[in-house]
Image: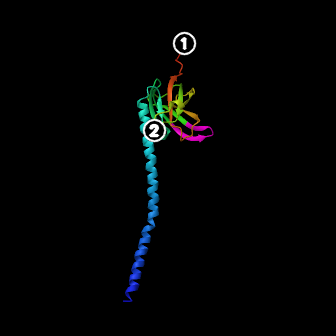
Amino acid sequence: MTTCYPKIALLAAAVLLAGCAHNAAVPQLRHQVAALNQKVSVLTDQTTALERQNQLNQHSDNGVYLLPAARSAARLQSSLGELSVSLSHIKSEANGTQAQLHVRILSQATLPPFNAVVEWGPLDEATGRPLTAEALSQPIASADSLLPKPGQDFELRFSGLTPEQLGYIRLHSLVSTAQPAVVQPH
């Protein structure tokens, strides 16, 4: 009987060591699950923002809404033609937020020079609608170019709001400033 105890002790030690070997993978799996949960949360937030952006644009008669959280371009039918409008490089600065606004023409080869208004502000957290009473705006003007180009980029500064508070940007009141060609009589 005494010989049985060492075998039982060896068997118990082997089972414990085998259990420890499996537990080493548990922290790694927990880390992977946490990382996946974070990615799913980010994608869920982005999807919600994109749905809100699309809904705002469906009900917009003049201009286009961009929600920074959507990270997606929006299309605008304007007097200039069909445009693609997007934001990038959104970052914090001393008095608010800085971003790049990209305006591209989709229906022609050349974007004519234009003036427009950019409005920005927070969103109502409950409804996802723009809080227009707290909105600010600024005019923008595209630069004249000797060469035809399909788009124009604007560096914008949104005062008073951090990137997290910047709920929406609206581009509206686009007006072409292109001069009609003048035919000189001979």
Disc nearer the start of the sequence (2/1): 2
Residue 46 visible to the viewer: yes
Q: Quadrant of the N terminus?
A: bottom left
Please give the residue where the numbered disc 1 appears in the rendered image: 184
* Quadrant of the frame with the C terminus: top right
The three-letter code of the residue at mark 2 reads: Ala
Q: Is residue 37 magenta?
A: no
- Per the image, label 2 sits on a secondary structure element best described as loop
| Res 111 seen here | no
What is the magenta range? 87-99
Whole-angstrom CA distance, mark 2 to mark 1, is 60 Å
On the image, the x and y values in percent for residue 156 come to 57, 34
Magenta stretch encompasses residue 92: yes
The chief SS type of the magenta part is: strand
Mark on residue 118?
none
**Residue holding disc 2:** 126
**Residue at 43%, 41% in the rendered image:** 48
- Foreground tag (2 vs 1): 2
Residue 178, above or below 123: above
Q: Hey, what amino acid is under mark 1? A: Gln
Q: Outermost residue toward the top?
A: 186
Is 144 placed left or right of 56 in the picture? right
Q: Which of the 4 image quadrants contains residue 9? A: bottom left
> In percent of the image, x 44 and y 70: which residue is there?
21
